[in-house]
Image: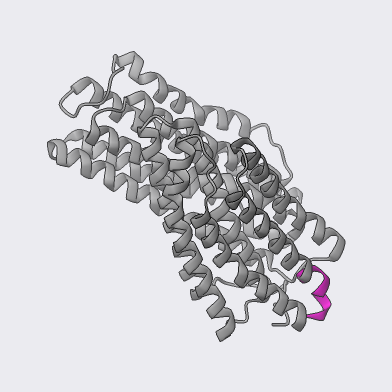
Amino acid sequence: MTGRDPGERDRSTTPLELLYDLTYVVAFGAAADELAHQIGEGHVGAALGAYAFAIFAVTWAWINFTWFSSAYDNDDALFRGATLVQMLGVVVLIFGLPVSFEAAADGGSPNNLLLVVGYVIMRVPIIGLWLRAARQDPAHRRITVAYAVTIAVAQVGWLLTAILPLPVTVVVAALVLLALGEMALPVVLERRRGSPPWNAGHLAERFSLLTLITLGEVVAATTAAVAALIHAQGWSLAAVVIIASGLVLAATLWWAYFLIPSRPILERWPGRTFAWRYAHLPIFGAIAAVGAGLRVATAAVEEEKISVLQVALSLAGPMAALLVMIFVTWSVLMRSYDLTHVPLLVLSLVPLAAAVTVPSLLGATGPIHPDDGTSLTALVAAIALVALAGIVEVVGHETVGFRHTMRALDRR
């Protein structure tokens, strides 16, 4: 474990990394399920807080492993074994997510011992791997030891917030400080002690593949929503529109994300990788939350106690966040703040605003009933308008924005 070549061209993701990613997609799906359930129960604020905590915990552990494997993946038996143990930790963490959301709904801390145990199982092997790299790669010993110590200290902090009888406000403040500290320290450490030999192109591919797999959550949630509608009233025009809108959502989100030329930019300017990787924390969360919004639509049809407005907000909110983050990521990565993209962004947000206003315009203010034509029409219109926002983003960028992307690349 002497380090990979950071300048290696065409470095690709390994089958082990793909297997590892699958457990994280399950974690994203579990967090989205809990978010949808708690929104349906009316605990919106608590659900969003618990969801943010879950997404950070899951994504940050994935980033830690990806950062290490990009630099030191030698694919030997010890590395494979450590990776499989981390996958076990993800599974344990998933079982802790319902406890986290329930506690938050009751006014408690989203952190809990089961979740932390899963996190410990995930992070102890990566600490060992950083120490192994420190022993076998003397040229990068200072930074690899620093990473091992940082993760160990942070993990002790996560554990203490779960076992100490502290007030909820103190625990939440400590969790926020721990999260900010874990994000800031790698930047400081690598500036002062040098970087491990991570490969920027490989990192771009790893993040894009997890984005791609996470989009499967949107497809799965679309299928669930349509299945609920079909079970309630059989095949109908509404079911066809919803499944088409859900697939359009997944396709346009994929298209919009890959309009960002991440790999060529990061290979040319690796120093931009940190800001780019942190932008993916809300990106992953927003994609999974779009799936949660579709699951809220499923619950609305099945349980008949959720309004169209709640469904519209559950979809339009994460969709807006995702479109904004794509714009921000493009701007930060390209180091170009082309004002042409601002009208495109605003134009793509217009259908989302319309989706939120549709229920009141159609008079669908109560819970959704499958046999109520007005509420069902409003539901279909809201979901279709959210999908339209993705179409506007893609068509606008392909017809206008892409030329500006190419000019920004040429200038650099």
| Left or right of residue 147: residue 155 | left
Query: In which quadrant of the rendered view does residue 146 lie?
Result: bottom right
| Whether residue 29 is situated above or below residue 44 in the rendered picture | below
The image quarter containing residue 34 is top left
Count of numbered marks: 0
Task: State the residue in front, 241 or 146.
Answer: 146
Which residue is situated farthest in the bottom direction here?
Answer: 77
Residue 319 shows in the view = no
**342 left or right of 369 in image:** right
Q: Position of residue 25 (x, y in %)?
A: 45, 57
Q: Nearer the viewer, residue 295 or 264?
A: 295
Residue drawn at x 67%, y 54% is 157
For the record, the magenta segment spans 137-144
Q: Please identify the quarter of the rendering in which residue 301 is found.
A: top left
> Residue 399's spot in the image, x, y percent?
53, 39
Left/right of residue 227 with respect to residue 79 in the rendered view: left
The residue at the point 41 percent across, 52 percent down is 29
Residue 234 against residue 2 in the figure, above or below = above
Q: Residue at x 80, y 61 (%)?
A: 190
Scheme of image coloration: one colour
- Which is the main secondary structure of the residues drawn in magenta? helix
Does the segment drawn in magenta span residue 91? no
Q: Which quarter of the figure is the N terminus placed in?
A: bottom right
Indicate the position of residue 188 as horizontal and vertical percent values: 81, 55
List x then y, in percent, for residue 335: 74, 45
